[in-house]
Image: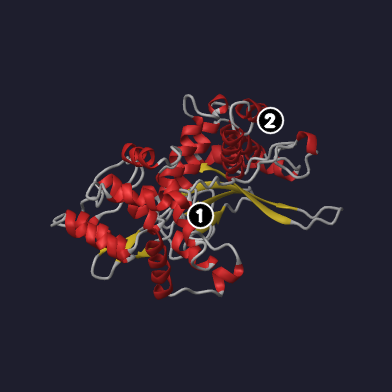
């Protein structure tokens, strides 16, 4: 449809059967009007750029001027003629202004705001899930008052230099190399997500070794209960049967569950009665650390512990109604002469150390709910519930003979 200069704006149609409609003036000016099905009407400029001698093909270039509510027909025509002249001569002032505004906005993004956007919008590539609450908290804490990256928090993320990164790393490393590595992983992840490229980045492989920051992989420090102390520890903990702290710790030792999954934390509810299937002898943890649900097939000993603590409770109630079992665990450790550094998580280490001699590596991975990062384990090896139940039962029988446990519970619950 063509539009003449004599046609008044009030006479323009507001809707068309096609998704969008373009109208050009017949007077040869580059001014045009675009009308959307919604009735929105916008002036635009359109010119033909001739082919160049260097072989570049001719092309049509269109630039928006603005809505008719802000520009009269005469003002829009004047702007279109000026813009067309610039475009023909190889300049695009509107694009330059928009690019300048975009760059200004990008430069205004501080590291703190960049971290907040990362937390809000970051999704895992393989399943589209958002960050876990604990991970989001740790990232945000980095840029808060007293955080490891607080000195850079109000700096533009696009103005952080390679020297800034190195100085920050060295300052934190004086206190703790582990903390420095954690801070740098956070900074690198946020910068990469925002597409920020640091010239001479200390993380780039092309950077000379003397200027590069090499982050060592996280290495665990297993500290299980020593084998010669294990039975004594179990006996001392069993003497406190009925205590949710002691029984929760025993449950971790028997199953290898994570302490946060059992007792809960500021970011997790902990084990609820509704998560327990006493008839089927199973416990289901949802959305665990690796973002997968995890089912534990209970040994007889672990099932006995849960029967006591689920009795007469609503399905929404916590199985072990305590958040921090630290004092009780420390008391048991002192009584038996176990290293004071043995924490609830070290009981998980102890489970893994015991199970390692009783089951295959792939069964142990499944019992511990660790991700399979090798092709064989992820795509070829499958473990049945029967195999896993046998593994958990074998560990429990080595730690606590079933007969002794059954008898103990019968006495305490009579």
- Kindly identify which numbered label has been placed on residue 45: none
Mark 1 to mark 2: distance in Å? 28 Å
Rendered position, 24 above or below 152: below
Q: Secondary structure at mark 2?
A: helix
The residue that mark 1 highlights is 124
Instruction: Look at 56% across and 72% down and name the residue there.
Output: 379
Q: Secondary structure at mark 1?
A: loop
The residue that mark 2 highlights is 166
Q: Along the horizontal axis of the image, is 281 left or right of 12?
A: left
Which of the two discs, 1 and 2, sits closer to the camera?
Answer: 2
Among the 4 quarters of the image, the one containing residue 2: bottom right
- Residue nearest the observer in this picture, 401 or 61: 401
Instruction: Look at 32% across and 51% down and name the residue there.
Output: 235
Mark 2 Cα-neighbour bin, 10 Å: few <14, some 14–19, many ≥20: some
In percent of width and height, residue 289 lies at: 44, 52
Mark 1 Cα-neighbour bin, 10 Å: few <14, some 14–19, many ≥20: few
Query: Which part of the image, by quadrant, shows the C terminus?
Result: bottom left
Whether residue 99 appears in this view of the structure is yes
Instruction: Look at 38% across and 37% down and name the residue there.
Output: 334
In percent of width and height, residue 410 lies at: 18, 60
- Residue nearest the observer in this picture, 219 or 315: 219
Q: Along the horizontal axis of the image, is 265 left or right of 180?
A: left
Instruction: Look at 46% across and 59% down and name the residue there.
Output: 368
């Amino acid at each position: 449809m063509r539009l003449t200069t004599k046609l008044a704006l009030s006479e323009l149609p507001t809707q068309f059967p096609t998704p969008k409609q373009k109208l050009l003036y017949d007077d040869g000016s580059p001014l045009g009007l675009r009308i959307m099905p919604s009735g929105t009407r916008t002036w635009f400029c359109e010119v033909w750029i001739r082919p160049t001698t260097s072989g570049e093909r001719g092309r049509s270039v269109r630039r928006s001027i603005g809505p008719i509510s802000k520009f009269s027909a005469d003002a829009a025509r004047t702007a279109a003629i000026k813009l067309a002249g610039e475009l023909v001569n190889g300049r695009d002032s509107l694009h330059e202004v928009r690019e300048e505004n975009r760059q200004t906005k990008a430069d205004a993004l501080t590291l703190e705001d960049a971290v907040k956007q990362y937390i809000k919008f970051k999704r895992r590539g393989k399943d589209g899930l958002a960050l876990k609450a604990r991970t989001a908290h740790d990232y945000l804490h980095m840029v808060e008052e007293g955080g490891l990256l607080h000195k850079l928090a109000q700096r533009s993320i696009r103005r952080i230099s390679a020297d800034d990164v190195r100085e920050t790393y060295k300052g934190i490393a004086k206190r703790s190399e582990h903390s420095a590595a954690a801070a740098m992983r956070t900074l690198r992840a946020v910068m990469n997500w925002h597409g920020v490229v640091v010239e001479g980045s200390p993380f780039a492989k092309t950077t000379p070794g003397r200027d590069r920051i090499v982050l060592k992989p996280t290495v665990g420090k297993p500290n299980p209960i020593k084998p010669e102390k294990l039975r004594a520890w179990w006996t001392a903990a069993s003497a406190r049967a009925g205590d949710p702290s002691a029984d929760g710790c025993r449950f971790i030792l028997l199953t290898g569950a994570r302490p946060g999954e059992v007792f809960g934390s500021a970011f997790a509810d902990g084990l609820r009665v509704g998560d327990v299937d006493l008839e089927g002898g199973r416990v289901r943890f949802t959305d665990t650390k690796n973002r997968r649900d995890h089912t534990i097939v209970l040994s007889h000993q672990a099932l006995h512990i849960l029967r006591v603590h689920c009795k007469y409770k609503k399905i929404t109630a916590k199985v072990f109604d305590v958040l921090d079992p630290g004092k009780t665990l420390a008391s048991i450790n002192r009584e038996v002469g176990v290293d004071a550094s043995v924490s609830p998580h070290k009981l998980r280490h102890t489970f893994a150390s015991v199970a390692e001699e009783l089951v295959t590596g792939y069964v142990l991975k499944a019992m511990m709910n660790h991700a399979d990062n090798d092709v064989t384990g992820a795509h070829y090896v499958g473990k049945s519930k029967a195999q896993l139940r046998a593994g958990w039962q074998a560990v429990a029988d080595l730690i606590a003979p079933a007969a002794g446990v059954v008898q103990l519970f019968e006495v305490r619950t009579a």
